[in-house]
């Protein structure tokens, strides 16, 4: 089976590595054009490109896929299947029709839940207890194609999006290999999605960072976990904006208004939430400082307690 792989970030690199480890014939890799990264904003390759080059695989980085030249270039590769994982572009129908087995996508949710760019983050943000990965046939709509296989996994109560991302990328890589083998053997199932049950997972933005203390402690914990590793939840105390990396539940009940500081000491900073409950911030980062335990920050920066 001649595989053309399409992907860009680390999530996709895990699938490409698994294909190579399991001796699939990857004849070329499509990835997004290099972009400026890091403090120096130098042009650099993404994880998929670096991996492909390290294995001597042809790398293609077209700026568009919607012209005759793009279709001709893909056709010349004689792909049996396109394996698409977090590529960064929607493929036009003209390309989907070229391979014998079409285009197979790995998606970080149990479709039709969380169609879109940030399925992993939204599963955490919404406090879901389970999520998973699936393989699907790409169609003209966004994440609307028929599902082939799914694999479910629980979400830890304090698991961050980054930690879940690392688990799902490996599950997705294994599922992709299984899918391609069964496609070639003619045994892969095909299940249309129930579009009436679809939910969306739009891109995450920095505007979502501020913690809303009127929410319940669990909702706030999930907010903190869901926005890691980027863009990270924030809170303002005494005019200073902190990045918040972890928090824990308490047994405290309070009549103070949400956002009030209930206590601040060796265990961290306890803050009033909605419903008369509190939450203890245990790890934070002040402007110009390193990420640290909240208790360590308080040693040199006492915070006024409201109650």
Image (tube, helix red, strand yellow):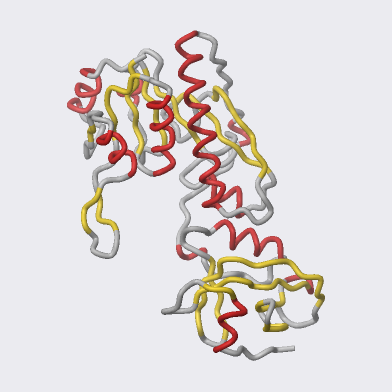
Residue 281 is drawn in which quadrant? bottom right
Instruction: Give the quarter of the figure containing the N terminus.
Output: top left
Instruction: Give the quarter of the figure containing the C terminus.
Output: bottom right
Tell me what residue is drawn at x 50 percent, y 20 percent. 179
Residue 263 is drawn in which quadrant? bottom right
Residue ranking furthest to the left: 69
Q: Is residue 291 left or right of residue 102?
A: right
Q: How many marks?
A: 0
Residue ranking furthest to the top: 186
Q: How far across and how far down the image is residue 59, in percent?
A: 23, 33
Tell me what residue is drawn at x 43 percent, y 22 percent. 22
Q: How far across and how far down the image is residue 212, in percent?
A: 62, 70
Tell me what residue is drawn at x 55 percent, y 89 percent. 300
Tell me what residue is drawn at x 58 percent, y 54 percent. 160
Residue 264 is drawn in which quadrant? bottom right
The answer to whether 40 is drawn above or below residue 31 in the figure is below
The answer to whether 193 is drawn above or below residue 53 in the figure is above
The answer to whether 282 is drawn above or below residue 61 in the figure is below
Q: Is residue 26 left or right of residue 138?
A: left
Frontmost residue, 56 versus 40:
56
Q: How far across and how far down the image is residue 283, in percent?
A: 58, 71
Q: How far across and how far down the image is residue 201, in percent?
A: 53, 46
């Amino acid at each position: 089976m001649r595989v053309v792989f399409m992907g860009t970030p680390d999530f996709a690199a895990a699938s490409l590595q698994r294909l190579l480890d399991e001796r699939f014939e990857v004849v070329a890799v499509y990835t997004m054009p290099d972009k400026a990264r890091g403090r120096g904003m130098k042009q650099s390759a993404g994880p998929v490109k670096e991996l492909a080059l390290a294995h001597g695989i042809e790398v293609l980085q077209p700026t568009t896929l919607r012209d005759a030249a793009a279709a001709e270039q893909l056709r010349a590769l004689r792909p049996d299947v396109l394996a698409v994982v977090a590529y960064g572009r929607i493929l036009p129908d003209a390309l989907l029709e070229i391979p014998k087995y079409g285009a197979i996508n790995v998606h970080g949710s149990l479709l039709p839940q969380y169609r879109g760019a940030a399925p992993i983050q939204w599963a955490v943000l919404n406090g879901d207890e389970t999520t998973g990965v699936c393989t699907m046939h790409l169609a003209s709509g966004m994440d609307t194609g028929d599902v082939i296989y799914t694999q479910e996994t629980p979400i830890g109560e304090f698991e961050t999006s980054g930690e879940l991302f690392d688990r799902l990328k490996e599950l997705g890589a294994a599922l992709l290999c299984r899918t391609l083998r069964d496609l070639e053997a003619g045994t892969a199932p095909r299940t249309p999605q129930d579009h009436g049950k679809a939910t969306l997972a739009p891109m995450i933005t920095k505007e979502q960072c501020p913690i809303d203390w009127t929410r319940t402690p669990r909702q706030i914990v999930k907010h903190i976990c869901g926005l890691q590793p980027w863009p990270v939840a924030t809170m303002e105390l005494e005019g200073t904006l902190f990045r918040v990396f972890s928090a824990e539940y308490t047994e405290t009940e309070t009549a103070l208004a949400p956002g009030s500081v209930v206590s601040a000491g060796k265990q961290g900073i306890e803050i009033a939430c909605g419903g008369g409950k509190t939450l203890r911030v245990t790890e934070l980062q002040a402007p110009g400082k390193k990420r640290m335990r909240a208790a360590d920050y308080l040693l040199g920066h006492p915070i006024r307690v409201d109650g």
